[in-house]
Image (cartoon, rainbow, N blue to C red):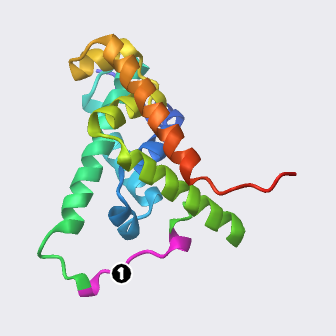
């Protein structure tokens, strides 16, 4: 049997994977592990497990990748929340370590961190149903019919939840946006 090389497909989805990990990992987890480490962990797992998978199309691959990434976040949350963890030996990452491999000026890093915190807070404020649909539709670009089938809801409900989530995010982000000086 011929083995399919999923690396090019995975490479095309790295940006979406990074966005998914950043959007779903809570602040506590991100203080322990940077997004780049979480993404790397998912990539290693995907490459190890992909040989046993077969995908109808790219959307099916994306759904599988999303599940692996979500399960990784859940596992990491359980790991870092375990009672046996000696809190005295755990060193949280500072903001500079969370810059995700991008060299930015300190002011740009601070602005980026504020933007990510605002977005993370806005995403966290969504209820689980809205967040799940929004991530599938807007981050992973899964068609509404596929999302509906996957979640066991009507396609019109997928569209409604997407619109509700986007409206909620827009309101939250506008309310928290710093006032800009007119040019």
**Quarter holding residue 126:** top left
Q: Quadrant of the N terminus?
A: top left
Foreground of the two, 140 or 131: 131
Q: Which residue is identified by label 1?
A: 91
Image coordinates for residue 57, horizontal then vertical, percent: 39, 16
The residue under the point 28% across, 33% down is 129
User: Is 116 left or right of 146, judged from the image as shown?
Assistant: right
Foreground of the two, 129 or 49: 129
Q: Relative to 178, does residue 96 appear above or below in the rendering?
A: below
Image coordinates for residue 166, horizontal then vertical, percent: 48, 32
Q: Relative to 3, does residue 33 appear above or below in the rendering?
A: below
In the image, residue 164 lies in the stretch drawn in magenta: no
User: Is 122 left or right of 153, judged from the image as shown?
Assistant: right
Question: What is the magenta range?
Answer: 88-97
Q: Pick out the residue farthest to the bottom.
A: 88
Image coordinates for residue 105, horizontal then vertical, percent: 72, 68
Q: Regarding mark 1 in the picture, which secondary structure is present there?
A: loop
Image coordinates for residue 4, horizontal then vertical, percent: 38, 26
Check disc 1: other Cα within 10 Å, few if <14, some if 14-19, many if 20+: few
Q: Relative to 157, does residue 16 appear above or below in the rendering?
A: below
The residue under the point 54% across, 46% down is 173
């Amino acid at each position: 049997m011929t083995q399919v090389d999923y690396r090019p497909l995975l490479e095309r989805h790295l940006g979406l994977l990074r966005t998914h990990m950043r959007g779903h990992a809570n602040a506590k987890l991100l203080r322990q592990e940077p997004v780049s480490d979480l993404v790397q962990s998912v990539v290693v797992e995907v490459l190890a497990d992909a040989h046993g998978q077969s995908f109808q199309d790219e959307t099916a691959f994306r759904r599988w990748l999303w599940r692996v990434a979500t399960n990784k976040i859940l596992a990491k949350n359980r790991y870092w929340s375990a009672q046996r963890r000696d809190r005295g030996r755990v060193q949280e990452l500072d903001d500079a370590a969370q810059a995700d491999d991008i060299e930015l000026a300190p002011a740009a890093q601070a602005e980026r961190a504020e933007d990510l915190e605002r977005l993370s807070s806005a995403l966290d404020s969504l209820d689980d149903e809205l967040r799940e649909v929004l991530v599938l539709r807007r981050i992973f670009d899964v068609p509404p019919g596929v999302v509906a089938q996957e979640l066991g809801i009507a396609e019109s409900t997928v569209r409604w939840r997407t619109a509700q989530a986007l409206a909620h995010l827009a309101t939250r982000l506008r309310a928290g946006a710093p006032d800009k000086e007119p040019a």
